[in-house]
Amino acid sequence: SYELTQPPSVSVSPGQTARITCSGDALPKQYAYWYQQKPGQAPVLVIYKDSERPSGIPERFSGSSSGTTVTLTISGVQAEDEADYYCQSADSSGTVVFGGGTKLTVL
Amino acid sequence: EVQLVESGGGLVQPGGSLRLSCAASGFTFSIYWMHWVRQVPGKGLVWVSRINSDGSSIRYADSVKGRFTISRDNAKNTLYLQMNSLRAEDTAVYYCARHGDTAMDNWFDPWGQGTLVTVSS
């Protein structure tokens, strides 16, 4: 089955830049999406179609794509950005798949 | 305000059944595809099922195929998930989520707050 691979954890100090990667063979052909999930809360869409930002999401959140890897970048990380981040895409048949999630720790 | 509110979760014995509901408000429910996604506490997100706008096209994850049934009532702005033959591994928080604006927009936004299903004797 199709898989998306994320690092389990990323740590950064406040004000630094956090980069979270997501790898998958179908990513050159399928868009990726990113969600932020804080403890006890539902996921929130922060990036769609690889690099588009929904209204209401701070400009410090951005996305990019290169080959089989997509990257969520958070510039000028703030304490409130500490959360789990999930990438999501679909395989060639349209089946939805999520990455395993990355825990972002703000030191 | 666009809102999704799940209900129907609870404790059920292995082999039992449960029906989850997701009440939608603040948008035209009848034109959107909808999904169910689950999350074992402390673990990652797992897609469960999706239904298109009029209910004519449905898909399931292999892990629930033949046991779960997704449906919708557009007149009541409500999405359902009928869960039968429940197993301990079905224990999770179940979220409903709205699909993107078109069939090709495979993102989920917004999500409901989730409802916990516990399968245990």
Image (cartoon, helix red, strand yellow):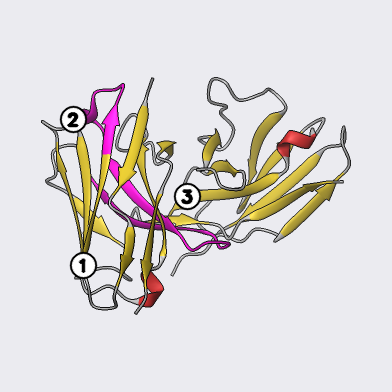
Q: Residues within 10 Å of mark 2 (few under 14, many from 20)?
A: some
Q: Which residues are magenta?
A: B23-52
Residue B15 locus on image (x, y percent): 23, 78
Is any atom of residue B81 visible in this view?
A: yes
Frontmost residue, B109 versus A94: B109
Q: Are marks 2 and 1 in contact (CB under 8 Å)?
A: no
Q: Which residue is mark 3?
A: A89
Q: Secondary structure at mark 1?
A: loop
Which chain letter matches label 2?
A: B
Residue found at x 32% / y 47%: B35
Amino acid type shown at disc 2: Ser
Amino acid type shown at disc 3: Ser
Residue found at x 64% / y 49%: A84
Lower sequence index among marks 2 and 1 = 1
Q: Which residue is mark 1?
A: B17
Q: Secondary structure at mark 2?
A: helix
The quadrant of the picture occupied by the N terminus of chain A is bottom left
Marks 3, 1: nearer the viewer: 1
Q: Which residue is mark 2?
A: B30
Q: Is residue A100 above or below residue B31?
A: below
Amino acid type shown at disc 1: Ser
Cα distance between the residues tagged 2 and 1:
27 Å
